[in-house]
Amino acid sequence: MERFLADDSGSLREKVILLDFGGQYSMLIARRVREAGVYCELLPYDTPWEKIRDYNPAGIILSGSPASVYQQEAPRCDPAVYEKGVPILGICYGMHLLAGDLGGEVKKGSRSEFGRTTFTIDQPEPLFQNSSFREENYCCGWMSHQDEVLQPPPGFNVLARTENNTVAAIGDHQRKIYGLQFHPEVFHTPGGNDVLKNFLFAICKCSRTWTPRSFIEDAVAKIRKMVKGKEKVVCALSGGVDSSVVAFLLDKAVGERAVFIFVDHGLLRLDEAEEVVQLYREKLQGQFIHIDAKNRFLRRLNGVTDPEEKRRIIGNEFIAVFKENALSMGDIAYLAQGTIYPDVIESGSAYGSAVIKSHHNVGGLPAELGFELVEPLRELFKDEVRLVGSELGLPASILKRQPFPGPGLAVRIIGAVSAEKLMLLQKADAIFRQEINNAGLSGELWQFFAVLTDVNVVGVKGDDRHYGPVIALRAVVSEDAMTADWARLPHDLLEKVSARITGEIPAVARVVYDITSKPPATIEWE
């Protein structure tokens, strides 16, 4: 099946290439570059120069890595990268690599530097010019390394040093090659974005061409180029942000030649399915098909307690239901789905990336469907998808929807799933969300939801002994979901939510609040 590629439209969009050496912040670097208005794409660290050249990059960034450059099997880039006159920025391992490759000396340092570290700037131009975190050249950056550059390569100057006299930045102004020991992309480096912007605009001479509007124009043109004449494209809808944005892009590109299939597995939040059905029917020009498959999914989940087995069953059943309906239509040539960039990387589809979790919309649809894939969001991060959706006119009720697991409430019901448990959790979750919204706190939280635990406890209701389930409430604050802290919700708010849940849902015996951060916990319970 052919992929919807980012570069098949002849777009003149500027690109910065990030060579990924396996650093934990690689995706974050790409996001920061895009937030500055420049398109950035990750490529494997050993991508040949001939392929890199085809992207006509305005600049190249070398990422961090858990490796050390002096190790025998250390990952290295094509040496031609340094010879073609394209500006380069190496970050942490990337600096060590370019320093060693170009004739400098890199060794394990006498002491490691992790976390917040101060350094002084010797040469502010051009990398550190107008940086907001500078006060009399005294700066603060986030370090994570054990190695250091003892001697920069010929032609390089030391631009900054840490308080331990370790090289913090180097640069060859003639060749426009620079290295940073610290991580400018992380939240803990105040002013780090200024350094990245100086590289992009003062050194690479980029323009701010990466905007939601420019993406939409490119995506619509590519969809029209791919889906020609009277050909039809079917779109798999889940009710979430990603598939909704794909649907509105298709609507703009091919109008009535799009067919939208919403497989309702019955595991969404209270009244959510009805809301998305109303939206799709009112706003989309193409044919909309709503498949109520709740009973079918519940039968398949009957008695299943393992969370990974739940995920597998729901993913397979979704594909089966979609397949039955899509193939019965007969005249469909293309399939559109909401795969986004993190899906590709987390599923191990990107070279050298570990499989973090499976996504049923990344290579999971059976080949016998015979459709060519249209994946217009494949190059976008989640926050970019929301910006594109806003530009397309999607309502806030869709765009501001919290992250929600693909298997839905099935993985917020600990243990076996049943219709009774599902209704109980939907009601408890709705009460929690309603009170959070009434308190005006929803915009301050990354996620907030209820969990039906697999624990029953003794309680008292009226004058009678009551034995029933425990509802756990979870609310977290986060910047990017890589880490998260439990939200310090007001006690009177928690008291009100608890009173409503135990009062309005007779079966519930107790309500508890989860105060575990990530790590050691995850945000979801399963």
Image: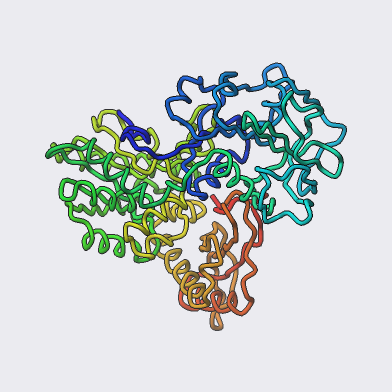
Residue 329 appears in which quarter of the rendering? top left
Q: Work out which quarter of the rendered image holds the N terminus and state it.
A: top left
Q: How is the image coloured?
A: rainbow
Q: Position of residue 251 (x, y in %)?
A: 23, 51
Q: Nearer the viewer, residue 119 or 71?
A: 119
Q: Position of residue 217 (x, y in %)?
A: 31, 47
Residue 315, compared with residue 456, is above or below; it is: above
Residue 103 appears in which quarter of the rendering? top right
Residue 185, compared with residue 477, is above or below; it is: above
Q: Position of residue 375 (x, y in %)?
A: 34, 39
> Which residue is at a point 34% across and 49% down the rendered structure image?
243
Residue 360 appears in which quarter of the rendering? top left
Q: Report the residue that reaches farthest toward the top.
A: 72
Horizontal side, residue 109 vs residue 518: left or right: right
> Which residue is at a point 38% across and 58% down the rendered structure image?
268
Q: Nearer the viewer, residue 342 or 515?
A: 342
Q: Report the residue that reaches farthest toward the front.
A: 174
